Amino acid sequence: MVLSQIQFQTLQMKQNDKKIIILLFLFMVFIFVLHYYVVIRTKEDMYMSKNNIKLGIAGLTAAATGAALFTAKKVSDKKKEEEKKVTSDYRNTERGKYEKNSKGIYYTNGNYEAFARPEKPAGVDNKNAYIVGSGLAALAAACFLVRDGQMPGKNIHILEAMDIAGGACDGIYDPTRGYVMRGGREMENHFECLWDLFRSIPSLEIEGASVLDEYYWLNKHDPNYSLCRATINQGKDAHTDGKFDLSTKGAMEIAKLFMTPDEDLYDKTIEDVFDEEVFDSTFWMYWRSMFAFENWHSALEMKLYFQRFIHHISGLPDFSALKFTRYNQYESLILPMQKYLEAHGVDFQFNTEVTNVEFEVVQDKKIAKTIECKVNGTETGIVLTENDLVFVTNGSCTEGTIYGDQDHAPNGDAEVRTSGCWSLWKNIAKQDPSFGHPEKFCSDISKTNWESATVTTLDDKIIPYITNICKRDPRSGKTVTGGIVTCRDSSWLMSWTINRQGQFKNQDPNKVCVWVYGLFTDVDGDYIKKPMRECTGKEITEEWLYHLGVPTDQIEELATNSARCVPTMMPYITAFFMPRTKGDRPDVIPDGCVNFAFLGQFADTPRDTVFTTEYSVRTAMEAVYGLLGVDRGVPEVWGSVYDVRELLDSSVKLMDGKSPLEIDFGPLNVFKKPILKTIKGTVIEKLLKDHDIIKSDMKY
């Protein structure tokens, strides 16, 4: 009754000075109810049961009333007390808007800060920096020290356990095995920190251009999109046809997750918030195959992903949202950074495994005092002062990678490459709770592993089967699959992709490098009746050929003579997706740290999502700016989650073109036309029409 009284009283108001208030209020109710109505309930009723799909009249009344009173109801007594502490008079001002936070940084957006060069920090010439690891985050930190911190290159020391830089961003030719890529990098136009960095890194391909220039031109000339997202029944197009196939209930489960506070998702799994309405949908097939999410992974990270990439919902089915480099991630991203740093005199120390960083805690100050390491197996140490800055990559998704080959599975006596990242983090974490809890991420490899493989074709015999699916020439040098092709009925949930060939600069032009991965490594295959983790490279190729549609009587011969395959088992590849709570990941700069910061996928930074190149570079930027005192804003995570246009678009796209106005809201249906009549002729009506909430054939 409360809602109906408000509606009909406001509709009768004629005064001009009240008209705009009415419009804004009704628009708030409209958006609130139609887009998120199932979420505005008490916490105890946050996750509705499978059978309780319809809202009761009491729930509808509470939801509508809550549209006006939602904030007041949600504020806890504790928060109210905190707000009372601020008693100064209100006044309009932007003074202090960009003051640095407790970590020594501030966030900003727009091109004013993006185009500006910071002043040289005081005392930087007398400082040294020790960076542990040489993956993307570590190299980015070194680049920011050089470019924005203006630190002399000779004062920057990169300590790497391996004999090559790059970390997880690899791409090598192994003479004994063949081409090896453990993974690939999907990127988009709103990786703010990544592109801020690569605008300054010279291209190795185009003289006078930056890596960003090269990448920008490439993706303008050869835009990415897929012509076949999934197959079924041995290479037949699954005809997902750009649809998500979500039921109304499934879409509302996603909407509820989207609106749930972070703290309510601590240590919860995706299974805790979704049921078969989501898991049986094409949406979930897209999502988990693209991002490698499993049902038991973090609901919090799932929510952050959805919020982070809400502006790309429409590009999810065909990968038109994605952009790729010309070559593999090592040659296109890592090598240009390494060359840039070497040109500035940065000191690379390979075969140097850091085993611990020892701290001195004085009152509220944490000071890194010693780096313990092994250089070519010999134990040594580096004594530090407060002028020595230490940046540590804690944890690694590719730590302990096991390499197989054409005739050997990645197990048993297979080669294992390790850099000690997890043991290093454990040793550091023992010294203070603010350094995180690595055991939350690396204690159950049955939930954090999957396996990838690089298949290289040796002749023309497999090419027609590839072309039949991707509908492009894989040897053209242009986009081929446009992202992964998922074998929807694969028991391994196998996906495969072919990026622009050659993927390696020195690759034989007649060969094609294919990246294959399986999300479920512990179940028997559909053609090879054994788990993926027990398969040789040849057997993985056979399973892949089966799902390409190769006749079964030709599979063994093609796998033996027409391809070479290098499998790689990665025990911790999705460790960062494990359910977590606040404090499990340490802050980039832990509280009280004077000369120490964490880098990479297991350091905590607000709103961004792991398993992206952007996350690595963002943590590096925050670490350098905070410890060195660089006076320039860190670009905030792209704010599409706060853009009503993106929210309206996503609500329609997620429902495969269905407007929220076409959903049956039971008793609330009676208010659709009055609301629409009230906004007729306003900018609100235009906004809703522009984003297909109000369709041309709707009458009101």
Image: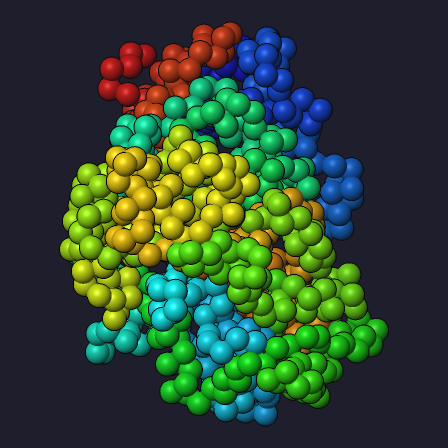
Q: Considering only vertical position in the picture, is 46 above or below 122? A: above
Viewer-closest of 13 and 205: 205
Judge left or right: residue 62 versus residue 616. Answer: right
Q: Residue furthest right?
A: 363
Viewer-closest of 404 and 681: 404
Q: Residue at x 33, y 67 (%)?
A: 332
Q: Residue at x 62, y 67 (%)?
A: 421
Q: Residue at x 63, y 31 (%)?
A: 272
Q: Position of residue 607 (x, y in %)?
A: 54, 50
Viewer-closest of 462 and 440: 462
Q: Considering only vertical position in the picture, is 660 above or below 564? A: above
Q: Position of residue 204 (x, y in %)?
A: 28, 76
Q: Residue 438 occupies which quadrant of the picture?
A: bottom right
Judge left or right: residue 428 versus residue 287. Answer: right
Q: Quadrant of the N terminus?
A: top right
Q: Position of residue 203 (x, y in %)?
A: 28, 74
Q: Quadrant of the C terminus?
A: top left
Q: Residue 389 occupies which quadrant of the picture?
A: bottom right
